[in-house]
Amino acid sequence: MTMTMIHASRAQEIEERYPEYFKRSFKQRFGALMIGCGTFLYMLYAVWFFDLPKLVSEAHWERFGLYMSQWVSYDVQPELRMQDDGSIKVWYPRFSPLGDNPHPDWMVNNADGSVTVLVSGQSRTVTAGNRQVTITGHGETYKVDMSGENPRLVGQAPSWMKVYDDNIMVDLGFAGDASISSNRVKIWKRFIGWPNFFFDTRSPFFDKPAGEVFSLILSGPRIEPDQSNLSLAFDNIWNNTAWQHGDVWTKLFQTVVMAFLGTLLGAIAAFPLAFLAARNITPNRLLNQVLKRFFDFLRSVDMLIWALFLTRAFGPGPLAGSGAIFLTETGTLGKLYSEGLENIDDKPREGIKSTGASTALVHRFGVMPQIVPVMVSQTLYQWESNVRGATIIGAVGAGGIGLKLWEAMRTNTNWANVGYMVILILIVVFLFDAASNALRSRLMGTNKATNSH
């Protein structure tokens, strides 16, 4: 084995030539450790400042699962009312998903006059009759005496029942729940899916199998003499009272138009202002600084705040939303455009200027070819981002699907409608993201570069 020895003078020469490796400063030696310790201490401070242990312990985590389940399911709420003669009357709330005169197969009229609701097959049932309610669930059966003023559970209550003075709450799992009070039993029976998504209970196509609906549309006799079945089906879907497809899609289109109009007007306003704000284009420091601070002001006021101001000025609607996007984008795009102009290569501009060309021609041939791809790329990205932003500002009254979404969430009952609108928003955002990326790639020449190989 041969070992290469470095002479002392040679080693000293190497150390002097590369002092950053041999004589590292305190910051270089312990900088990473200090950053790690600082980050850890900051995280501890954040835990203390926001009182995260208390928030975690007191959070209603069960509501998350409940709300998510309601996105993909619905419940039917029959009520069993005990009459004075001992009979049971079944009542459904108005606008029930089952229609005006439902006769579901999970509601069984027994020979003794009692009524059994099959909440989940034979394993979870509620039977009411003869001043008594029988509940079967979780492998157990309990009886509730209804002869007194308030219901009384016979035996000790299990963990899936809550007994109060005048009410007994029964948890039968995801399949449903029941509430037993004096002379009545209300049941929430849950189903997977979105009820009456295409046709509501008023439609002549309601509750018909898909094959029969297609047969009626394609070759069946006219249901309405003055309207084809295809036109009638489309009208029933568009004006579905439960899902309000027509209103939802109109509001979604409003959101897209708000984002497009606000971004377009912001780009048109920011384009000339950016030339005045760029130091290398307009050598006037005062004007440069005034315009840049103006851009900062427009950007510093959030789009949501602008929407609140404009809804007070013009009233709720898409005009306020478009105006909020316009003001925000004037500031954002003005800053981006001016910074792009300040970073261009001055050689083409100087070459064209040396030929005696006018200022307009210098900008046209010396500046625009460099800056237009960057401007269009940034504008496309902002447009894509504003499609999402327009949804948020709609919730404060600026129109669009955001307002519709907020109205559905505020009722705390239409979570399936919320899920429907969220999915539509995700699809639109995905499509605009893909389209924007494709346009930016084509504009910046990446497709051509790829094809050339």
Image: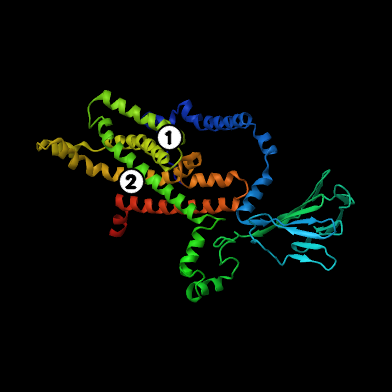
Q: Position of residue 388 (x, y in %)?
A: 45, 45
Q: In the figure, is residue 276 to the left or right of 59?
A: left
State which quadrant residue 92 falls in: bottom right
Q: Residue at x 66, y 36 (%)?
A: 55
Residue that numbered label 1 is attached to: 310
Q: Residue 39: percent from the left, percent from the top?
A: 55, 32
Render colour scheme: rainbow
Residue 422, above or below 211 = above
Within 10 Å of the Cα at label 1, are there few (<14), some (14-19), or many (20+) other Cα atoms? many
Q: Secondary structure at mark 2?
A: helix
Give the residue at x 44% y 28%: 23
Label 1 sits on what residue type? Leu
Question: Crowdedness of circle 2 by 10 Å Cα count: few (<14), some, many (20+)?
Answer: some
Image height of 309 relative to 392, above or below = above
Q: Nearer the viewer, residue 21 or 413?
A: 413
Residue furthest out toward the right: 155
